[in-house]
Amino acid sequence: MRFLSAVLMVFASIFVLVALIDYIEMMRRSSDIPNVSAILVMKTSFYRVPQVTERIMPFCVLIGAMSCYLNLSRRLELVVARAAGMSAWQFVSPALVVAFLIGVFATTVYNPVSAVLQEQSKRYEAELMNQNPTGLGGSTTNFWVNQRSSDGQAIIGAKTSRDQGVSLSGVTVFTFDAAGHFKQRIDARAAALEPGVWQLFDARVYALGVLPADHAKFPLKTSLTPEQVRESFATPETVPFWELPSYIEIAEHAGLGAAGYRLQFQKLLARPFLLTAMVFLAAAVSLRFFRFGGVQKMVLSGMAAGFLLYVLSKVTEDLAKAELMHPVAAAWLPVFVGGLTGFIALLYQEDG
């Protein structure tokens, strides 16, 4: 219970801090929008905080476990437990079970909720962007997809996407005829996928030898299905855990790259074990008696171990997305390294 309360307290503190910082940033970005709704800005900011805090959940477990065991050691409760014949493995095992259950909950419940809220946040942000197209267009992420239809080929790019790519904003389209010759360029404020057609809104069409023409609504034929579009425009982090297997299967049948979705699926499967590995690391640096001194070094070494594990996970993630490393190995290698390091360090301290 002390471990669980410590982890929840750390997580709640970081959640509030992230929400406050993100809300201030959103207020700054929307300051030039006339008659902006503070409630809309607050919901836009608040709904994307769960996904940010989901990424730092392992560090919450690490810091919570270190805080829990350091407090127990400072109060000499660990000394009493050892004097009663309990080993470190006995009073670490409840924390391991709790951390594993937290990981299961985070994967099966928290992740789908955060993905849904992230999509809702994108919708609210799009409403703000519609009020001022240049005020909140701060996203530098660009998504591209290539399509072929009876009219030829088209390359579609978008600055932002919603509903896993079915709705786009900041759209640029380059069209080519069946022979591969350039036909026209289309810039549109937004686009929506309908059966057999992209509907481009507030579009300006640039064609060779013709003056630019503005269209309130411009149709563009397509053979893409919503599932294929989602594979190109939906980031793996916005896909709920329970939908990832179907996304991977659709991508394989469509011949699209699914490395990012496989990696995300394996990372979510490995999350309970990653949290238990964090408990091992925390226990390895937090069970020393206070009277021996060196508490500051223990805390710094635990934070350094967590940071190095984070760097390792980012490196393996980038390698997997570049298809230079198998997603299974990329997702489980940090878990194996962190868990084994903490286990060996704890085994050496307790059993020599």
Image (spheres, grey):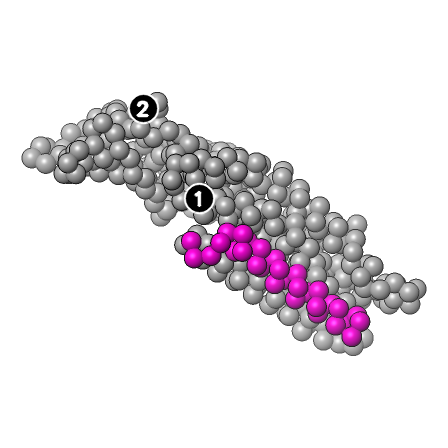
Frontmost of labels 1 and 2 is 1
Q: What amino acid is at disc 2?
A: Gly
Secondary structure, mark 1, is loop
Observer able to see residue 218: yes
Residue at the (20%, 35%) spot, across then down: 175
Residue under pointer 1 = 258
Residue drawn at x 87%, y 66% is 82
Q: Judge whether residue 184 can be spotted in this image.
A: no
Quarter residue 293 falls in: bottom right
In the image, what residue type sits under mark 1?
Ala
Residue most toward the left? Answer: 209
Nearer to us in this view, 38 or 293? 293
- Figure disc tally: 2
Q: Which residue is mark 2?
A: 196
From the viewer's perspective, tell me whether residue 85 is left or right of residue 56: right
| Residue at position x 71%, y 64% in the image | 343
